[in-house]
Image (cartoon, rainbow, N blue to C red):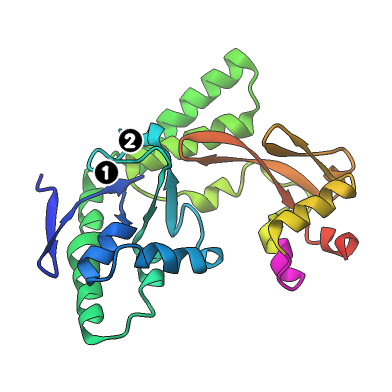
Amino acid sequence: MNNLIKINNQDLIVKEFKGQRVVTFKDIDKVHGRIEGTAKRNFSENKEKFIEEVDYFELNVSQKNEIRTLEIPNRGITVLTASGYLMLVKSLNDDLSWKIQRELVNNYFAMQKRKRAYHKPIDKAIKQHFNIAETIINATGIKPELAFSVAVNEAEKETGYSYEEYKKLLPSATHEVSSFNPTQIGEKMGGVKANKINKVLENLGLQEKKGKNWRITEEGKKYGEEKPYSRNGHTDYRILWHEKVINILK
């Protein structure tokens, strides 16, 4: 496999994560002829508009083997997907930038679509990992929603497809659906920061801090629930809230 693609006469090293092509801030500055640090600054200024694990991934040094063509520093590194790249550079409207965007989309990001034919078939991957999950559940008593979340995440890696919508079904909802995180609640309340929302939820006795993570309290279960998620190879639970929690926050 040729690990170099030429964009705007610059050699770009191919980098793939979770079955899709990604680029670094340094790559973007290089092919667009911008001062190093420009892309990172623009991303930082607009980060709230980007969706993690859709538009970008935050990688840590322990994941250095997952992208063999990328050197990950101790402080970690951010990589952008095709959607993240296009969002980041949409403010660059000069003729050269449009040309470079077309080159990257057609000659770099589009290559991942042709590669997907070589990934494991979707049905085979799902069945295999769900069978493994069921075996682990029966043997250890681990919560099914956590085991199946891992199974879906592993199937994503093997097929190159995103199962994000299916993850939202874990666990199956038989009651009011919880779907709002603190950032989204803050947006609905006129731009309140997520850390302030978390503090108010804590003061109301709806959640409590255990270690580095928030955990829902018995009182909090009236307004939300903990749902499994996988990120950067780590599986845990996060709290999602019913929209009705906004009424008591106000």
Q: What element carries label 2?
A: loop
Q: Is residue 180 visible?
A: no
Between 238 and 36, which is closer to the camera in this rendering?
A: 36
Q: Give the mark, 2 or 1, whose residue is nearer the N terminus.
A: 2
Q: What element carries label 1?
A: loop
Looking at the figure, which quarter contains the N terminus? top left
Using residue 245 as the reference point, say whether residue 138 is left or right of it: left
Tag 2 and tag 1, C-beta contact below 8 Å: yes
Q: Which residue is drawn at 71% across and 70% down?
A: 191
State the residue position of label 1.
70
Instruction: Residue 64: give its label.
Output: 2
Residue 239 location (% of width, % of height) = 71, 45
Q: In this view, does 223 lie above or below 95?
A: above
Q: Which residue is drawn at 24% across and 38% down?
A: 68
Residue 38 location (% of width, % of height) = 36, 68
Asked whether residue 190 is drawn in magenta, I would say yes
Residue 208, image quadrant:
top right
Q: Which residue is drawn at 59% across and 21% down?
A: 137
Q: How far apart are marks 2 and 1 (CA)?
A: 7 Å
Residue 213, image quadrant:
top right
Looking at the figure, which quarter contains the C terminus? bottom right
Using residue 49 as the reference point, say whether residue 68 is left or right of it: left
Judge the density around disc 2: few (<14), some (14-19), many (≥20) Cα neighbours within 10 Å. Answer: some
The amino acid type found where label 2 is placed reads Lys
Instruction: Residue 200: give its label.
Output: none
Between 128 and 67, which is closer to the camera in this rendering?
A: 67
Q: Is residue 144 visible?
A: yes
Q: Residue at x 83, y 58 (%)?
A: 245
The amino acid type found where label 1 is placed reads Leu
Between 120 and 92, which is closer to the camera in this rendering?
A: 92
Asked whether residue 152 is drawn in magenta, I would say no
- The segment highlighted magenta reads 185-192
